[in-house]
Amino acid sequence: MFVLSPIDAGLAGCAPSAPRGSTLGFSLVEALVAMFVVAMGILALVALLQAATRFSKMSELRSTAALLASDIADRMRANPVGSESGAQGYDLTDPVFPSPLAPTHAACTRQAPCGPADLAHVDLADWTARVRATLPEGSAWIQFHAGPAPAPEYLDVWVGWADPLTLAPGIASDRAGAQCPAAWRNAEASVRCLYLQVAL
């Protein structure tokens, strides 16, 4: 016959007993809720990564457009007579998007020097080729304004491109191309532009 000692008997009386009908551990509902919370967190991280990638690409394109606009501005300031020649100089106001490349022109050399208008055409041919090569559907719009005295004369420069994430027709864009010429906005919903005013 097995007899409990007084100490064992006391411990046996203090042992907690699980209530009848209860279960230990996680229930199926609790596990499903935990999985749902984790899945929502993963989806949020994926959306955040996608947005970061898109805004990084948009920032890269805008920086490229700013460099291109500064490049043509320097060329126009270096050739003020050509800049003031309107359609015979640096003007590019084609309403088509993407805008056509400027026609090629013979290079200016010591043996065949260029006048202001010829230099403007050489600059435009080189510059529009760079715009097209470095931006998606890269386009350029340049317009001379003769300000009445004593207002300075200036040129409007737009460098445009198509947002690569809204190239499919019929897809609404999350940002309007309000900085673009109206002709471009009507031609292409995904157009983005950088505007620079160049005073002469």
Image (cartoon, rainbow, N blue to C red):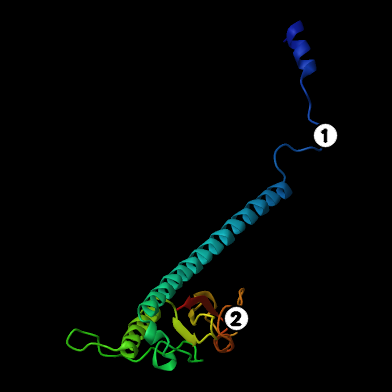
Residue 171 is tagged as 2
- The local secondary structure at tag 1 comes to loop
The residue under label 1 is 20
- Where residue 43 sits, quadrant-wise, is bottom right
Residue 38 coordinates in the image, percent (x, y): 63, 51
Sequence-wise, which precedes: disc 1 or disc 2? Answer: 1
Residues 48 and 98: in front is: 98
Q: Amino acid at mark 1?
A: Arg
| Residue 48 sits above or below residue 185 on the image | above
**Residue 172 falls left or right of residue 33:** left
Query: Split into 4 quadrants, where in the image is the C terminus?
Result: bottom left
Which residue sits at x=58%, y=61%?
47
Residue 70 coordinates in the image, percent (x, y): 42, 72
Residues 158 and 46: in front is: 158
Determine if residue 91 is in view: yes
| Residue 12 sits above or below residue 150 on the image | above
- Where residue 181 sits, quadrant-wise, is bottom right
Which residue sits at x=60%, y=78%?
178
| Residue 55 sits above or below residue 80 on the image | above
Spatial CA distance of label 1 from label 2 is 61 Å
